[in-house]
Image (spheres, rainbow, N blue to C red):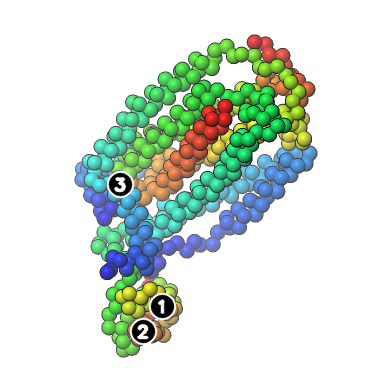
Amino acid sequence: MPKIPFHLVSRSPWPILASFQVFNMVYSTAKLFNSSSSSYIFLTNFCLMTLISWNWWRDIVRESTYEGSHTKEVITGLKLGMMLFITSEVFFFLSFFWAFFHCSLSPDIFIGQMWPCKGIKSFNPMGIPLMNTLILLSSGVTLTAAHHFLMTGKKMKCNNLLICTVMLGVYFTILQYIEYKEASFTIADSIYGSTFFMATGFHGIHVLIGTIFLFICLVRSKTNHFSSYHHFGFEAAAWYWHFVDVVWLFLYIFIYWLGK
Amino acid sequence: MATLAKKIVSPVASGARLMSTGGGGASATAGKHAEAHAKMWANISYFLVLPGVAIASFITFKNESAHHEPPPEFVPYEHMRIRKKNFPFGDGKRSFFHNPETNPLPDGYEVEPHH
Amino acid sequence: MALQRVLCSVSRRSFSTARLGGLFKASDNLPNPLEHASGLERKQLLAELQGNEDPFDMNIQKRGVCTKEKPHVVYSSFHERLVGCICEEDSENVVWMWLRQSEPKRCACGYWFKLQKVEDH
């Protein structure tokens, strides 16, 4: 057996293609916001980004599940990587919370020296937002249960609970969409609207990403990719989902509730 | 001395072992114990959490479908309905989740609220 | 240790062993982790189950004779490997050196090391 437990990845085009594509995404997003031309180039680039990501992750699944290249040491590295990534996402949200606190703790005279700004009718925190909080907390419980069944080898029970988790995630997204549609203010309505929709909007995108990640785990679980001992993909999805849940709790408490 | 040395020089190997032992040990301390633990979580999920979500949904939708108060009167505040740059979709004048009844444009409501 | 416990708990359930043959049937239980693993990961698991806690020689090894005639053998799949010598028990730093094929090296403290290439199997 090779005398190193680490995985020296064989040559792959995806990292460099992904890095070029990230540049394309930034460029086309800037172009979308700043020029009057159509948004097709943005959509094309977005689809290309999805394709490249799909292929790269597919290769990782092949290397780990089928080729068996993911030894304990490799998984340690992956755990560190996932934790660092989630930490970077925490800092990403930190910036939006900073903006929110900067504007809300001492409101400018231009917006009426009050928070919410003059003319803004904020959401009732005891309505759908409270429902959403309950949904995400519940999905955390079902996900934990699914993980325990995975660790004890009960595939069917794990899959059922994983389906519940995914459905709760979708339910959250639907409710947030309804809230957005029914809102009495838009992103362009004062700094309140800006901070609100930037923070909750990016959170919604992360919920979508987390839901997709969990759905992929469901598909992999059904096709026997996981064993009760080795299922880091599932664990990474679970960590990400719990992070999304925690961000929502902060959003709910500070923006919906205390910011009312 | 050997165990102390393991920690200093080969942190990756021992760390990996510790991490994986921690992860596996937490679940499979003994088959029955882990299964009972999993069952507990399943019971909480199916009998507490999911019915709770169902009941809360029912209550929320009952409250939401109740009569809404009409949208506030339109006051052309300068800090609202900011349009320094057009939106990059459609005609550029409406936001992505625009609701004609509750979101006025810079010069007023598009549609008169009918409730 | 954890793996052994998991495998024991899996094999204790009699119906799991009966289903070993029907891996493609829809069963309620996940595949046996040892059977599920493949490649290098599987080799690592097998080595661990056989009692070899350090199949990749990453842990600290206790010195042998380490003279010029009988240097300490360091295994590698490649033609060179980084080796660190902890000269004394209380040394605060490690003396690192590259070991290459057929070129035994001597650390400043007087101990000799030699690289032994191991074929992948």
Q: Is residue C79 left or right of residue A46?
A: left
Q: Amino acid at mark 1?
A: Val
Which of the 4 quarters of the picture holds residue C64?
Answer: bottom left
Residue plotted at (76% across, 23% down): B76
Q: Amino acid at mark 2?
A: Cys
Q: Check disc 3 and report the residue beneath it.
A: B26
Say the numbered circle drawn on residue A71.
none
Q: Are marks 2 and 1 in contact (CB under 8 Å)?
A: yes
Calculate the distance from the C-alpha at mark 3 to the C-alpha at mark 1: 38 Å
Q: Check disc 2 and report the residue beneath it.
A: C109
Q: Is residue A235 above or below residue C51?
A: above
Residue plotted at (42% across, 31% down): A138
Calculate the distance from the C-alpha at mark 2 to the C-alpha at mark 3: 44 Å
Dividing the image into 4 quarters, which one contains the N terminus of chain A? bottom left
Q: Secondary structure at mark 3?
A: helix
Q: Amino acid at mark 3?
A: Ala
Front residue (pair C9, C35): C9
Q: Is residue A82 left or right of residue A48?
A: left
Q: Is residue A185 above or below residue A237?
A: above
Report the number of numbered marks. Answer: 3
Task: Give x and y (percent) for residue A218.
Answer: 43, 39
Q: Is residue A183 left or right of residue C90?
A: right
Q: Secondary structure at mark 2?
A: loop
**Are the numbered discs 2 and 1 placed on the same chain, yes or no?**
yes
Q: Is residue C61 above or below residue C103?
A: above
First-in-chain label (2 vs 1): 1
Sort mark 2 into few (<14), some (14-19) or many (20+) by Cα contacts within 10 Å: few
Q: Are marks 2 and 3 in contact (CB under 8 Å)?
A: no
